[in-house]
Amino acid sequence: MIESIVIITSSGSQKVEFDTNHHSKCAIDLNLLNLSDYKSFDIKITFSEPIAKFRDHDYTWQKCKKNYIANPFSPKIVKLQNAQIVQSNITSGIWEIDYKNPTVLLWRFNPEFSSPLTSYLGNENRKSIVLAEQKLNFIANPTLLFPKNEAIEISRSKKPFVAIACFTDHCDFDTAENLVLQRIFFKEHQIKITKGFFLNHFSKREDNASFQNQQEELLQWNNDGHELCYHSLSQSIKSNEDSFADFEQFVPPLNDIKVWIDHGFQPYNFSLLKNSDISEKKFEGILQDKNIHTLWNYIDSGTATNGVINQFNTQHFTLSNFLKGNKNLGFIKKMQLIIKNIIFHYYNEEDLILKYKYSASRFKKVFFQRDLKSFFPFIKDVSKLGSSIFSVLLFWNKKKNIPYKLAKYSPIVFKHTITDKEFYIFQTLEMLDFKKSLSHENINALTNEKGVFIAHTYFSVPMKYHTGKLFSTPTTIDKKVAENFKYLGNKIVNNEIWNPTLIELIEYWARFEKVFFDIDFEGNIFERNNSGLIFRKFS
Ligand SMILES: [Zn+2]
């Protein structure tokens, strides 16, 4: 069934010998290469016949007529043309099939864009997307299992095989007053969230909430079953010296706060670590001392809107789907938005993003302030932007369905080693408009697709221009939004959606690393060690 196995690293390809006597499994010996030398590698498996079907992220069989990507939390199960099922023994890595080349299965470990981190580099703090450092060691050698009848798939959710809705909230606009209103609202709809808070009240806004001033209220959130998480340490920025002193010396107000969300440009932020005054070793040690093991650093797979809600469905994160979700807008507005999406999400290259931002400000300078010095740089940027946009529009039919770069592998949760210690990094779905994002259609789609979102929200945002926000006035909750949350809450109560806090989700998903399947003499797949996850057999 297997024609060849080749291991591909940055230093070349190497053919692997494999045991052809064993009919029900094929182990791939990784001892051949010194894995610690590499940041990533691929195993290229060529079958003697094409892959006819694959088990998709929504736990359904799909014909191999589109590309297949299965990350560590999706089934790694395919069916060959002769109906033989092929399944992986571990959850690590990514399975990728190009439907135009259906005899080849790529088993990829940490490929480009599968574990993206934001890092601000250089004198100008330029935003860069870098690949996480991952320990490429697994519970067992990657092995293909060929069961006689049935494969085994694992539920991503604690309630068997249902969708997951997780909220992580940024407290930028929280006040003593709106904190209470939010808490009562979520209690009414039985929704749990992961609530960011500022530990210290150091803010230009007097009424900004913080643990320092609103301790009692925030402890009530904790009592209600919400998770509290750090949102840096304060709203406004102190001097470098004072900031680092705060960071080193703060005392965790509770002993189970494990999540850290970067806010603003705080000098001690994880995303500024490469430019920071403290060493990575020291930074890691401070996080470890304070019990923090999960970090967020400015990566959204996209913005939720009509039809964009499931981070596991890469087809939600395409230009075509974005247009569909905004078809009620006028032509000019639609063009503006699509150009912005091409630059920010399709290309997602800092160079182009900066050119886009400069062009807007130079346009004003040239045409309104008659600043002729800006004319040539403006023309240069606009022509570069124009050609990039044009190349997408020219091949629109092909490019409109390509998933955005940072959504391709659905890198929602992955590990990163700062120096020695591993941390979990999570990627979010930006969620600003709750009328569109949490519409009945979207919630139904999420439920049907057994999908997942980890929302990046600002529940207390007061801005007038912000449509679909939770608060319609500083003291009232928007009726339509409340109705959407009621619908979501009912799905949660009826066990159609699992609504974990972030740490519940991460700690549950951490068990995927322990999964280790094997096959017995009769060709039945079984679990070698008890991961505590929920499984089901199917064919
Ligand atoms: Zn913030």
Image (cartoon, helix red, strand yellow):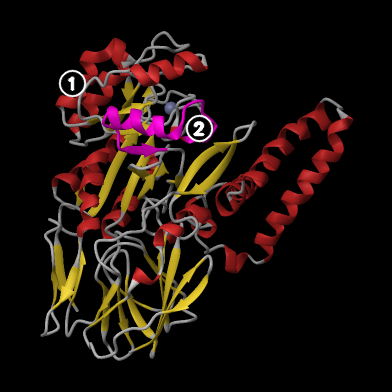
Which residue in the protein does label 2 denote? 272
Q: Nearer the viewer, residue 224 or 297?
A: 297
Q: Nearer the viewer, residue 252 or 150?
A: 252
Q: Would you place residue 460 above or below residue 358 in this image?
A: above
Q: Earlier in the sequence, mark 2 or mark 1?
A: 1
Give the magenta-colored segment's residue range. 271-296
What's the residue at 29%, 59% (across, down)?
Answer: 73
Residue 436, labelled with which disc?
none
Most extreme residue toward the right is 372
Type of the residue with mark 1: Gln
Q: Is residue 343 left or right of residue 436?
A: right
Q: Nearer the viewer, residue 73 or 366?
A: 73
Q: Would you place residue 500 above or below residue 258 in this image?
A: below
Q: Quadrant of ligand 1?
A: top left
Type of the residue with mark 2: Leu
- Residue 189 location (% of width, % of height): 20, 35
Q: Is mark 1 within 8 Å of ligand 1?
A: no
Q: Is residue 410 left or right of residue 158?
A: right
- Residue 428 location (% of width, % of height): 39, 44
Which residue in the protein does label 1 denote? 220
Q: Nearer the viewer, residue 484 or 343?
A: 343
Quadrant in which the C terminus appears:
bottom left
- Residue 284 location (% of width, % of height): 37, 34
Q: Would you place residue 316 above or below residue 353 in this image?
A: below
- Residue 40 location (% of width, % of height): 45, 60
Most extreme residue toward the top is 206
One can see residue 91 in this view = yes
What's the residue at 36%, 44% (across, down)?
Answer: 426
What's the residue at 27%, 46% (across, down)?
Answer: 165
Q: Is residue 224 left or right of residue 228?
A: left
Other residues around mark 2 within 10 Å, as few (<14) / some (14–19) / many (≥20): many
Q: Is residue 291 magenta?
A: yes
